[in-house]
Amino acid sequence: MPPRLLLIGGGRMGSALAAGWAEQTLGPSFAVDPARPQLPGLQVVADLADLPRGFIPDCVVLAVKPQMAPDILPRLAPLTQGAVFLSIMAGHSLAGLGRFLGTAAAIVRAMPNTPAAIRRGISVACAGAHVGESQAVLCDALLRAVGDVAWTSHEPDLDAVTAISGGGPAYVFLLAELLEQAGLEQGLSPELARRLARRTLSGAGALLDADPADAADLRRAVTSPKGTTERALAVLMADWPDSVSRAIDAATERSRELGQ
Ligand SMILES: NC(=O)c1ccc[n+]([C@@H]2O[C@H](COP(=O)([O-])OP(=O)(O)OC[C@H]3O[C@@H](n4cnc5c(N)ncnc54)[C@H](OP(=O)(O)O)[C@@H]3O)[C@@H](O)[C@H]2O)c1
């Protein structure tokens, strides 16, 4: 039987997921979002009260902002019989979600990232104690529709995952901004500086994806002895290892704080 889904929140991440599911065969499936976006394959309603009477989904995907959880989750508790909850909300632990949904609820907590919008995301998921095997398989398929999926049985890993892959696209976009800015400082035209920054990052990302070599080896392949890249890397190596380590440490700590 094709799965019946209920998506709560059809914003950036919710709509990326819905687009990924569009090629899968679904049973009757709905999304709840007061902004009522158009979502492929899902019938969108403005409020839970607008769902058809007796609709029991196989999976409820929680994709609202974390601060909406106290308003919405208690209203979803009646669906816990038979449904697995897949939460992508940052900072809500399995135990915290269980306090809203009931301690016997089947809950999977996952952290995707925004390249999900082009099905190039990566999600890390962690299943709570009451999740059955077929429910884990369903959640895996729903996340896999928008990219790679890894599972962990150690929930605290999700704090570091949030810091590295959840926020990671922002660090890459920052590098694009900085490269573009540096190009302007060197006198390149705005159009060329922007094009070089974007193409260099997307091309290097695609190469990293296609080539199984270590990132360090790919870096060395660009770095001739006494050449220009070596000169730039000497500057970057003085700061980046420590900066990146401290940035990830700060984000991981913030994720832990949000989870309390
Ligand atoms: N963006 C990321 O990089 C990222 C990565 C990993 C995980 N996440 C998680 O994904 C979740 C969603 O993030 P997002 O960036 O997609 O946020 P978003 O774009 O703000 O999407 C949330 C959607 O939920 C809607 N909403 C508000 N109240 C609702 C209600 N009562 N019932 C149903 N829907 C409601 C919002 O409508 P209005 O706009 O009208 O309020 C909005 O369309 C967050 O919990 C976040 O932690 C995000």
Image (tube, rainbow, N blue to C red):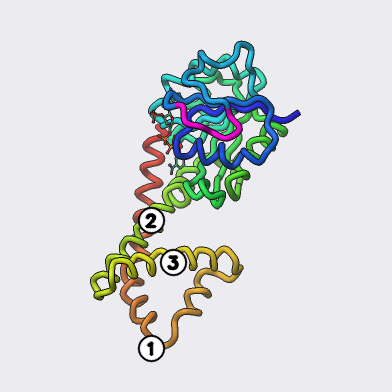
Check the image and name the residue furthest to the right: 1
Secondary structure mostly seen in magenta is loop
**Residue denoted by label 1:** 226
**Numbered label attached to residue 171:** 2
* Amino acid type at mark 1: Lys
Mark 1 or mark 3, which is nearer to you? 3
Residue at the spot x=67%, y=38% of the render? 24
Q: Are marks 2 and 3 in contact (CB under 8 Å)?
A: no
Disc 3 element: helix
Residue 256, position as x, y percentages in the image: 41, 39
Check the image and name the residue furthest to the top: 53
Q: Please tell me which of labels 2 and 1 falls first in the chain.
A: 2
Check the image and name the residue furthest to the bottom: 226
Q: In this view of the protein, which residue sits in the foreground, 14 or 41?
A: 41
Residue 11, position as x, y percentages in the image: 45, 35
Over which residues does the magenta segment extend? Answer: 36-42
Q: Quadrant of the C terminus?
A: top left
* Amino acid type at mark 3: Arg
Mark 2: give few (<14), some (14-19) or many (20+) Cα within 10 Å: some
Q: In this view of the protein, which residue sits in the foreground, 260 or 220?
A: 220
Q: In this view of the protein, which residue sits in the foreground, 250 or 66?
A: 66
Question: Does the magenta-highlighted stretch encompass residue 89?
Answer: no
**Residue denoted by label 3:** 199
| Gap in angstroms between the C-alphas marked 1 and 3 | 25 Å
Count how many numbered circles sit on residues in the image. Answer: 3
Residue at the spot x=47%, y=31% of the render? 37
Q: Are marks 1 and 3 in contact (CB under 8 Å)?
A: no
* Amino acid type at mark 2: Tyr
| Gap in angstroms between the C-alphas marked 2 and 1 | 29 Å
Residue at the spot x=57%, y=14% of the render? 78
Q: Please tell me which of labels 2 and 3 falls first in the chain.
A: 2
